[in-house]
Each structure stands twice: as C-alpha cells, then as structure tokens.
Image (cartoon, rainbow, N blue to C red):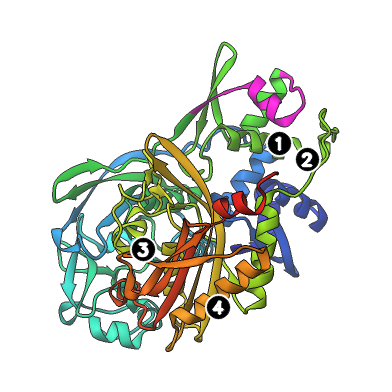
Amino acid sequence: MPTILLDRKRINKALNKELSLEELEKLLEYIKCEIKEQNEDELLCEITTDRADCFSTEGIIRALKGVLGIEKGLVNLNFFEDDIELHVDESVKNIRPYVAMATVRGLKLDPRALESIIRFQEVLHETLGRNRRKASIGLYDLSKLDKKIFFKNMDLEKIKFIPLEKNEILDGYRILSETEKGKQYRHLVGQSSAPVLVDNNGTFLSMAPIINSQDAKVTTKTTDILIDSTGFDLNFITSIVGLMAYALSFYGGKVGLVKHFYPNSSFLLRFNNRTFELSKRYAEEILGFELLEDEFQDFLLRARYGFNVYGSKYEITVPFYRVDVLGPIDIVEDIAIIKGYENIEPRRPPLETKSRLSEKSLLGSIVREVFNGLGFQEIVNYMVTNSILQSERVGLDPKEIGLIYISNPISKEYDCMRANLFPGILEFLQYNRSNAYPQKIYELGDVLRFQGNRIITDFRLASAIIYNSASFEDMHSCIYAFFKAIGLDFNLKENELPFLLKGRRADILVKNEKIGWIGELNPNISEYFSLYQPIVAFELSLSEIIKFKFPSR
C-alpha cells in the first residue's frame, strides 16, 4: 500500500481542531488510512490504493472536512479555457502515444506545500503509474514557457537540456547514463531516441517519462503550473492529470483546460464528473438497515458527493478525482464508512446452512500440496486482462479461443476476460527476469470464453518452469505426481499447438478426453516476452477433472 507523510499540526490547523493522536487515528480510518509510525508530529501512514485522491495531504484534509461535516458536498474547482496549445507529433505513436495537459494558475506555494505536491507526484508514479511504465507526470513553471508545446520523438544526440538538480547541459545519451532517473527508467524509451516535450522557443520541458528540465523547474515563487501525463491510454492519463490538478487547486489556483492537437483530431481536455442512479432502498438492502431520508442525504454530502432527487431515485454526482468509484455499490460503501461500521448492529443471517468444502476447494488443496511440495510458487493474476496478450503474443486466434471483450474498458490494458492462464504466467516471468533461475510457478483460476452462443467458465491449473535446461520431462514428472495424488490415470497424445515446440508438445488425455496440454515453449513466443531461457509449461481443466474425481457430488 502507498505510504504518505502527514504533519499532524498542519491537519489540526486545517480542520481548526486540536485532535489527539488517538482521535486523528480514528478519523483517518474513514478514508482507509492507517498510522504506522510517529516521529513527534510527523506521521507515516499507509492508505489503500483505491483512494488515490487521498494520497496527498491536500486530499486528506478535504476528505476529513467532509467526514466531520465542516465542508459538505462536491469540492467545486474553478475551470477556465487556457490559451496553452499542445501539439502531438505522429513520431510518438509507437513509443508513448498519448499526452494530457492542464494548467493551474494563481497558486500560492510555500516550501511545505511544494514538498507535499512533489511527494504526491512520486506516489502517483509508483502506484497508479506503475513506476512510470503506465503513466508519467511532469510539473512545469508556465512563466518560463511559450504557449505552444510540442510532444515528439527525437534522436538522443539532439536532445540537450539541463536535467533537474544538474548544473550542465546533457544530451539524451548522457541523461540516460549519468542521471539517477535516467539509469532507473531508461528501459522505457528507445535505444537511440526518446519522446520529449519542448515549447515553440526550443525550451525543453522534459524527456518523457525520464526526467524534467531545470529550465522549467517549479519553485515556491511559481504561481502558474503546467501539468502533463504521458502514457498509453488517454482516459487513464487524463485521470492522473485531474488528480494533480485537484491537489494543486487546494492552494487557491484555477484549473486551465488545454487545447490538444493530435495528428487526426483536436479537442479541449476536460475533467468530467460522472453520475450514477441510486435509490435509498437499494442502499438499505445492501447495508441491512433502514436510513432516514435526512440521514441518507447527510452521509452522501459528507462523503463529498453531489446529488439531485427525482422521486424515489437519487442522481449521484461523483467528482472526477474519485477514480475509485465505478458504480453505485462503491457509493453505498462510502455511506457505510461515514455511518461507521462500529455503529452497524450485527445480525445473524435469516438462512442457516450447513457448509462443506466445494469440489474446487478440495481439488485446489491437492494442487497446492503437490506443487508447493515440488518447489513451485503460486501466483495470482487478474481475470480481466489484455486481448493482445491472450492472442497475438502467444500466436492464437481470438475467435478460435472464444475471447470475450469488454465493451467499454476503463483501460486498454484490461479490455477482455482471460481465455487461458498461461499468457499471464509468461508475462509474470517477463516481469521477473532479474530474479534467479530456475523459476517454477503455477496458477489456479477461472477462465471465461465463448462456446457458440454461451459463455463457459472453466476452472484451470497452469504451470511453467524456466531455466537453461528446462525440458518436457521436468514438467511431465510433475503432472505424473499430481495425477497420482488425485488417483486418476492420464495419457499423452501429440498435438499441433503453435506456441509449443514441434516434437516436444502433447495433449493431456483422461479416459480418452482431452483436458489440457503440455510442451516446451516455441522460442519465437519466448522472445515476445524477452525470455531467452528454455520454458516448459502446461495448462489443464480442473473442471473436467472434477467430473471424473467427484462424479456423485
């Protein structure tokens, strides 16, 4: 979980209260924040990843004012159309295709405020930005820049500026080899070029997503700030810019909307609130207790939502910076939090049943006992995944595997449901290339796929071994141990799966019924994942095994 640094005196001053440590600790629980360490008035806190708006002191103060009823309803930001123009060049399309920008003008920053904002920027980099891989963030002093900004790819030898905290001009090669950020993030740009932000006068803002320029550094004298975020999903990086603008506006600034010019489109980047329909009755059914109308409305306002009432229905306005709210159920959760879980009377469920372990649980326990005993590590991936990972990167046709797409994905990284487990396992190995070999991993989980006009759920097991002499026999012996543990016989029959090496691949059969496959990975597929060691893997359907293992249950 993200860690943030809070100044207890600053919180008390903002809330106009003298809260004891115990009182503040209790109050922070309302925003899913927990104090871990204390050094006089300095508090080191952990906060859950879903409350990104509270990764900063500014966001926490606004949220706590709502909890206490000091301020209620939406935090209204002042927006205006700025005269800044952002022009995106075609050359960035294949390296880091999107950039989003906004401004915040009329700020009054003291050293503590500036430190807090910079810390918030770094927390966003590490969490939502996935260490800048998914999104990077830049802050610049607008007074030092021209009104026309360009985002383009440039040769490293032509990139020349003074990086932050340096005192000499470096070219792109030296920035990547001599600066701390360059060494840390050089894998995110090309070997001979990198995307840059540069204004109409030739002043460099940054080499994205590596490091900013000293020429546009933000200081306590800065009153107007330009915010940018670069990445691979325009909606996502827009939300990142929105979070930064929300935090900066705490210091009296107005948020400027910037005109964006892309090769095939132009638009004014806006930050739009969302609306959801919610009835008090629905909330009561979820919570398990009745709410008075005034109480229900008070909880919504203290959670910093807006609303309009239409008969028995509420149209709830969710502010743009609450990126964690995906539907009405999240609003109900906030109502429960504001109510206080300790104030909710526990009740015994009206239906009492005698429980037993499901077949999935019983079989899963056997899998873990066998594979953990063989030295494997269990991993867990998301069911929502990437269609390119599931198909193109492993040489499969999305129609043939019955891939289920999400109609309105929040991010292109998560645009479908997984139809197979093994692509996620290969991606896991890719992210862990720096760890020692051999690596032996397995995963248990459901996959979803179309079969005709129906959606099929299949409980599966997949595993992989990678090291310099991994072979078919290594994995065959593991499968033998598993089937012996469950008391079933199996056979192998050669197959023609494209992601497996010819002559070293087979179907797994139980009672002449195909339930999975085993084989050594085709080196062409391994190279897609930057894996250059032999890999042997298998995937099989535990749902099919349950039919044989528990025929009468």
Residue 336: mark in rendering:
1
Give the residue displayed 37% in from the left and 47% down from the top.
403
Tell us which disc is closer to us: 4 or 3.
4
- On the image, the x and y values in percent for residue 414 come to 41, 51
Labels 2 & 1 near each other (Cβ < 8 A): yes
Q: Amino acid at mark 2?
A: Tyr
- Per the image, the residue denoted by label 4 is 477
Q: Amino acid at mark 3?
A: Gly
- Per the image, the residue denoted by label 2 is 341
Which SS class for mark 1? helix
Tell us which disc is closer to us: 2 or 4.
4
The answer to which quarter of the image holds residue 449 is top left
- On the image, the x and y values in percent for residue 208 come to 30, 68
Residue 138: mark in rendering:
3
Tell us which disc is closer to us: 3 or 1.
1
- On the image, the x and y values in percent for residue 525 come to 31, 71
Q: Nearer the viewer, residue 138 or 33?
A: 33
Labels 1 & 4 near each other (Cβ < 8 A): no
Q: Amino acid at mark 1?
A: Ala
* C-alpha span from label 4 to label 3: 52 Å
N-terminal-most mark, 1 or 4: 1
N-terminal-most mark, 2 or 1: 1
Give the residue displayed 74% in from the left and 48% down from the top.
27
* C-alpha span from label 1 to label 4: 52 Å
Which range of residues does the magenta coloring cover?
Answer: 276-292
- On the image, the x and y values in percent for residue 545 come to 58, 55
